[in-house]
Amino acid sequence: MKKKYDFVTRKSVHIHLQKDTHAEFRIILLKESLTMQEVIEECVERIVQNDKYMEKLIEACVHKRNTGERKIADLEAEELYKIIESENKEK
């Protein structure tokens, strides 16, 4: 019997995405017949191989974190979801 998961050589990573980001990402990948696993794994492999584009992407992420840009965007999105949710409850 073949194992479904290889926990010895593979590790699992869990991420949280905004619902709309997740949906858009999924749609883009479905159009190309790709899975999130395939794409994210490719990105990670390129990062550890020091791909120049991915290095610039990491630098941009560091900049967003250092300037607070990412945190502000996440907080704004959360606030919008709370407002929408409360308006839906009132109806």
Image: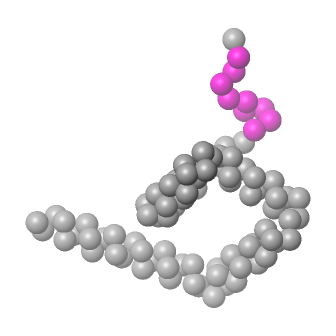
Residue at the extreme right: 49
Q: Which residues are drawn in magenta? A: 2-10
Residue at x 62%, y 46% (from the top left corner): 34
Side of 33 where 58 appears, left or right: right
Q: x, y percentage for residue 22?
A: 50, 58
Quadrant assignment for the N terminus: top right
Residue at the extreme bottom: 67
Residue at the extreme top: 1
How is this picture coloured?
one colour
* Position of 14 relative to 51 (above/below): above
Residue at x 44%, y 64% (from the top left corner): 20
Side of 4 where 73 appears, left or right: left
Q: Is residue 22 visible?
A: no
Number of numbered discs present? 0
Q: x, y percentage for residue 3?
A: 69, 21
Side of 5 where 86 appears, left or right: left
Q: Is residue 4 magenta?
A: yes
Q: x, y percentage for residue 13?
A: 65, 49
**Main SS category, magenta section:** loop
Q: Quadrant of residue 35?
A: top right
**Front position in the image: 15 or 54:** 54
Residue at x 12%, y 68% (from the top left corner): 90
Q: Is residue 39 visible?
A: yes
Residue at x 57%, y 84% (from the top left corner): 69
Residue at the extreme left: 91
Side of 88 where 39 appears, left or right: right
Q: Is residue 8 magenta?
A: yes
